[in-house]
Image (tube, rainbow, N blue to C red):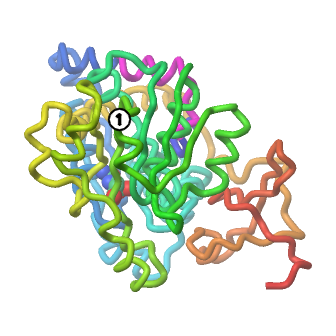
Amino acid sequence: MRSLIDILDLSVQELDALTDTALDIIAHPEKYAHACEGKKLATLFFEPSTRTRLSFEAAMYELGGHVLGFSEAASSSAAKGESVADTARIVSCYADIIAMRHPRDGAAYVAARNAAVPVINAGDGGHCHPTQTLADLLTIRREMGRFDHLTIGLCGDLKYGRTVHSLVGAMSRYEGTQFVLISPQELRMPDYVLQSMGKQGIPYFETADLDGAIPGLDILYMTRIQRERFADPEQYERLKDSYVLTPEKMAAAKKNMAVLHPLPRVNEISVAVDADPRAAYFRQALNGKYMRMALILKLLEEAKTPAAPAGLEPDLVMSGYRCRNRRCICQTEQELPQAFRRTEDGVCRCLYCETAAEREDMGT
Ligand code: NCD
């Protein structure tokens, strides 16, 4: 069963085809108005959301389909202790496709392995957010006219901001991409993302200085400091105002630089920037709906052949290591085995959250 858990589940050709479909939907919405008649999308949102959930729902309605689901964990059986695996099995009986957001890294993977219908990861903890990347890609295509040879500045909370992890994965596959990673030291990009860039030979440069970086950028992708993922509230207070994009800062940017932001914004982009034609973030939110329409169409088409839940993939390392990421789904889901994948660089990474695993004999 084809699901979308990580943006790398889609090839570059598939990403290009999805953006083509989205552009066709924009041009000819009437062609798609009945495409999902009789189909149901379940939106399982264990964590707050405005754009992602509503744009999934709007996407399904505009395809002629139906939507069911919940918008907070408290109104689901998770509040009674139900596992993600069981919820996924049960919802497969009621819906043709699932979009799920969950506060734990790796939760969508667990759902996909236990569901009998396609699962779309609508954000798993601080890990990934592939459908936001689909929105980002359509925005880049419409604003810049191309995907290649772009210098992309990612600014803010690169540690917990799941959208930037997925965006790096997608854009690393286009020729001439370079990243400027702008963050405080404490919120640097996780090592698994840096290592994957290094392995692919993608040039990247880490800095804390937005002013110094801005003149060289084609795209500036701002992110919110992710308060809900900090273990230490004092650290959040110290870092929350790290970056504020203002018209003064924009004056030093290229005339055609695009400013993206997955939203919601807190204070990292001043409202005065909204009137700048380079501010693309509200257009980006609308693009998200069209890309989600294109994705739902694709996954439902591919799901025409029914399949049994896949279970865990083969060739995993199942003992001798432990996951040290306290935000990983494997720390809370009863009965879920700790499992690891050995990556090409020889490092054993948690199957669910990709954090480098610790050898069990290394102590705590
Ligand atoms: C993002 C998310 O949920 O990760 N929002 C979104 O989906 N548009 C970014 C964020 O919450 O900061």
Hey, which quadrant is residue 291 in on the image? top left
x%, y% of residue 256?
25, 24
Dividing the image into four quarters, tell me where ligand 1 lies.
bottom left
| Nearer the observer, 223 or 118 | 223
Q: Is residue 75 visible?
A: yes
Q: Is residue 315 above or below residue 289?
A: below
Q: Which residue is mark 1?
A: 215
**Label 1 sits on what residue type?**
Pro
Q: Which residues are magenta?
A: 7-20
x%, y% of residue 354?
67, 56
For the point 14% across and 31% down, the residue is 277
For the point 17% across and 40% down, the residue is 282
270 within the magenta span: no
For the point 53% across and 64% down, the residue is 185
| Nearer the observer, 78 or 328 | 328
From the viewer's perspective, tell me whether residue 273 is left or right of residue 60. left
x%, y% of residue 189?
55, 55
Q: Is residue 35 above or below residue 331?
A: above
For the image shown, how many numbered marks are present on the structure? 1
Q: Is residue 296 visible?
A: no
Q: Dot 1: few (<14), some (14–19), or many (≥20) neighbours within 10 Å?
A: some
